[in-house]
Image: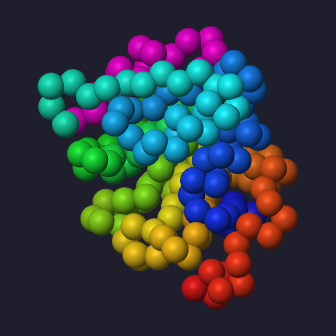
Amino acid sequence: KNFLIDSGSDAIIKNCFHSLCNDNDSIIISSPSFPMYKIYASMFALKTQEIGFNETPVFDLDNILSAIDSNTKMVILANPNSPYGDKKSMSEIQNLLNILYSKNIYLMLDEAYVDFGDKTLVSLINKFDNLIVLKTFSKAWGAAGMRVGYCISNLKNIQQIEKVQLTYPVSNVSLKF
């Protein structure tokens, strides 16, 4: 009930924007980051606020908090981040989630690179209704061609995202993988 499998995590990004955001909502992303965030945001008329790194390759979460306004609907954070590998701890993410929850803002936590030595923060979905964790088999598993990704969240979010999912998003071969 907490998992949604789709044709790559980028399809889930698209479906989250489509099902959880409205025209003229805004999203906040770090820069540089996965280019599909901006592409899908523009498809759904979402305003994108890009938050850059400071002088070091360590991303400052306070910069995200400073960028939040009344139109912010979602924050997207890759953890660990690509291309720099910056990682946020569970307590840092919990603090961020608490603030976002109080403002009715989703956190999409992209864990595409978590298998390269970091700890997943999936356990936080039991505490925060505003958390969506993305996973993929394309990085550590080397299976980008299989086109399988998934998200983990609460049942309400999963049911909402499923509404815009393709009828058969993943092939039989990919499912067997």
Q: Position of residue 30 (x, y in %)?
A: 39, 32
Q: Quadrant of residue 141?
A: bottom left
The picture places residue 138, in percent across and down from the top left corner, at 46, 69
In the figure, is residue 92 to the left or right of 25?
A: left
Q: Is residue 62 left or right of residue 75?
A: left
Q: Where are the magenta residues, as a range? A: 58-73
Q: Is residue 102 visible?
A: no
Q: Residue at x 15, y 25 (%)?
A: 55
| Residue at x 53% of width, y 24% of height | 48
Q: Which residue is painted at 80% across and 70% down in the image?
A: 168
Q: Total of numbered circles in the picture?
A: 0
Q: Looking at the image, is 161 positioned above or below residue 170?
A: above
Q: Residue at x 56, y 12 (%)?
A: 69
Q: Percent x, y for residue 149? A: 58, 65
Residue 41 visible somewhere in the drawing: yes
Q: In the image, is residue 173 above or below residue 113?
A: below
Q: Is residue 121 above or below residue 97?
A: below
- Picture quarter with the N terminus: bottom right
The quadrant in which residue 116 appears is bottom left
The outermost residue toward the left is 55
> Does the magenta run of residues contain 61?
yes
Q: Nearer the viewer, residue 95 or 176?
A: 176
Q: Is residue 103 magenta?
A: no
Instruction: Name the image colouring.
Output: rainbow
Question: Does 74 sit left or right of 171 as displayed?
Answer: left
Q: Is residue 110 above or below residue 99?
A: below
Residue 100, image x, y percentages: 55, 27
> Closest to the observer: 113 or 170?
170
Q: Quadrant of the C terminus?
A: bottom right
